[in-house]
Image (cartoon, helix red, strand yellow):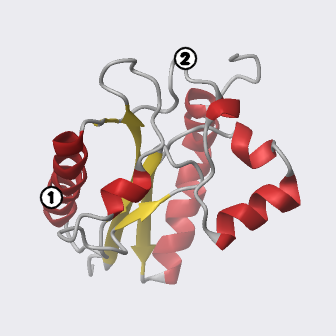
C-alpha cells in the first residue's frame, strides 16, 4: 500500500507583553520594522498586541519544528531588544479586550466598522495546524475518524463568555 502524501503548515499567534505591568502591549508595528523578519511569515493581527507567525508548506514534522523554532526566535529577539516580551497562551489572564488597539490596516479597520465591537472583543490567540491530504479517499477516511475527537477538542478550546 502506498503511503499517503501529506503536507503540514502551522500558524501561531503570540501575545506582546509589557515586561513591567505584564499587560498586553500594542507593539506589532515596531516589531515588524525589524528588517530581518520574513514578512509573510511574520504578520500583524487584528489587535496590535498580537503577532502571528506561519511556516511554509512542510513535508515532515521536523521541517515544521525547525521553522517554528526560527520564527519564534525571529519575533522574540526584536521585541526583547526594545522591551516587550512574547508569550504564548490562548488568552491573556487580565488585560481587557476594550483597551486593545486595532491594527490600522484596511482589512482590520473594515472588519471593526462592519461588525462593531465583536471582533475587538475576540481577544483570543490560536495555534492552527493545517494538513494537506492529496489522496481524496484517505481525506474522507481521516475526516470521518476526526469527527469522533472534534467535540472533545472543541470543549477544551472554548472560551467562556463570562471571562471578564
Q: Which residue is mark 1?
A: 70
**At 39% across and 39% down in the image, what residue appears?**
16
Which label belongs to residue 104? none
Of the 4 image quadrants, the one containing the C terminus is top right
**At 44% across and 82% down in the image, what residue appears?**
135
The relative height of residue 72 versus residue 38 in the rendered view (above or below) is above
**At 70% across and 22% down in the image, what residue appears?**
160
Residue 11 appears in the rendering:
no
Of the 4 image quadrants, the one containing the N terminus is bottom left
Q: Nearer the viewer, mark 2 or mark 1?
A: 2
Q: Residue 132: percent from the left, percent from the top?
A: 42, 74
Instruction: Give the quarter of the image for residue 20.
Output: top left
Q: Residue 110: percent from the left, percent from the top?
A: 77, 67
Pick whichever, 108 or 65, lies toward us: 108
Q: Which residue is mark 2?
A: 94
**At 26% across and 81% down in the image, what residue appears?**
2
Q: Residues within 10 Å of mark 1 (few under 14, many from 20)?
A: few
Q: Are marks 2 and 1 in contact (CB under 8 Å)?
A: no
Instruction: Give the quarter of the image for residue 118.
Output: top right
Pick whichever, 83 or 65, lies toward us: 83
Circle 1 SS class: helix
> Left of 56 or right of it: where is 16?
right
Amino acid at each position: 500500500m502506498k503511503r499517503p502524501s501529506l503536507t503540514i503548515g502551522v500558524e501561531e499567534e503570540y501575545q506582546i507583553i509589557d515586561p513591567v505591568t505584564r499587560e498586553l502591549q500594542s507593539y506589532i508595528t515596531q516589531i515588524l520594522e525589524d528588517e530581518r523578519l520574513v514578512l509573510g511569515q511574520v504578520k500583524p493581527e487584528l489587535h496590535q498586541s498580537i503577532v502571528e507567525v506561519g511556516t511554509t508548506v512542510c513535508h515532515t514534522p521536523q521541517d515544521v519544528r525547525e521553522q517554528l523554532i526560527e520564527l519564534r526566535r525571529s519575533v522574540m529577539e526584536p521585541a526583547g531588544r526594545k522591551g516587550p516580551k512574547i508569550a504564548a497562551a490562548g488568552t491573556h489572564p487580565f488585560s481587557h479586550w476594550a483597551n486593545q488597539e486595532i491594527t490600522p490596516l484596511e482589512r482590520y479597520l473594515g472588519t471593526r466598522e462592519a461588525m462593531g465591537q465583536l471582533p475587538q472583543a475576540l481577544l483570543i490567540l490560536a495555534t492552527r495546524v493545517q494538513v494537506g491530504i492529496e489522496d481524496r479517499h484517505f481525506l474522507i477516511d481521516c475526516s470521518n475518524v476526526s469527527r469522533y475527537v472534534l467535540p472533545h477538542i472543541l470543549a477544551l478550546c472554548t472560551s467562556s463568555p463570562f471571562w471578564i
